[in-house]
C-alpha cells in the first residue's frame, strides 16, 4: 500500500508532464463519456416525447368519452349459486358511454 502511495506522490510531484499515450487515453475517456451522455439525453427526450403524446391522446379520449351522451341498456349477469352447478341471472340497467373505440359502463339510469 505504501509503494502505491509513494508512486502517486512521485507522479504528482513530477514536473515532466504526461506522455502522449496518457493524454490520448484521457481524451478517449472524455469523448466516450460525452458520447454516452448525449445518447442518454437523446433517448430520454424520445421517451418523454412519446409518453407525452400517449398521455395527451388518453386525456383527449377520456374527455370525449365523458362528454358523449349515454346509451341506456340492460346487462344480464349470471352468478353461480353453489357447488351444485345452478346459476342465477339478474338484469342490471346500465349506461354505456362510447367514443373513439373506448367504452365506459355505469350502473343506473340517466338523469
Image (spheres, rainbow, N blue to C red):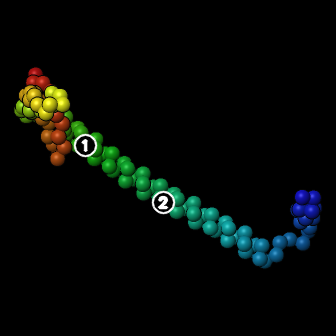
The secondary element bearing badge 1 is classed as helix
Q: Nearer the viewer, residue 87 or 36?
A: 87
Number of the label disc, if any, that sits on residue 60: 1
Rendering quarter of residue 97 = top left
Residue 75 lies, in percent from the top left, at: 9, 33
The secondary element bearing badge 2 is classed as helix
- Judge the density around disc 1: few (<14), some (14-19), many (≥20) Cα neighbours within 10 Å: few
Say left or right for 37 vs 86: right
Q: Nearer the viewer, residue 35 or 4?
A: 4
Q: Nearer the viewer, residue 72 or 35?
A: 72
Quadrant, the C terminus:
top left
Instruction: Examine the rendered structure and indicate whether residue 25 appears above or below residue 50.
Output: below
Is residue 106 something that shows in the picture? no
Is residue 15 something that shows in the picture? yes
- Which residue lies under the disc numbered 2? 42
Give the CA separation, mark 1 to mark 2.
27 Å
The structure residue drawn at horizontal position 19% and vertical position 43%, both measured from the top left corner, is: 102
Quadrant, the N terminus:
bottom right
Report the number of discs. 2
Residue 9 lies, in percent from the top left, at: 91, 61
Residue 63 lies, in percent from the top left, at: 23, 38
Residue 21 lies, in percent from the top left, at: 77, 77
Amino acid at each position: 500500500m505504501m509503494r502505491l502511495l509513494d508512486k502517486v506522490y512521485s507522479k504528482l510531484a513530477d514536473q515532466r508532464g504526461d506522455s502522449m499515450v496518457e493524454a490520448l487515453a484521457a481524451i478517449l475517456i472524455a469523448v466516450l463519456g460525452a458520447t454516452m451522455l448525449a445518447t442518454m439525453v437523446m433517448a430520454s427526450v424520445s421517451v418523454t416525447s412519446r409518453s407525452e403524446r400517449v398521455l395527451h391522446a388518453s386525456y383527449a379520449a377520456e374527455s370525449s368519452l365523458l362528454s358523449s351522451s349515454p346509451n341506456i341498456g340492460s346487462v344480464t349477469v349470471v352468478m353461480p349459486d353453489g357447488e351444485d352447478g345452478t346459476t342465477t341471472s339478474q338484469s342490471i340497467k346500465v349506461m354505456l358511454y362510447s367514443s373513439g373505440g373506448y367504452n365506459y359502463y355505469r350502473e343506473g339510469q340517466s338523469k
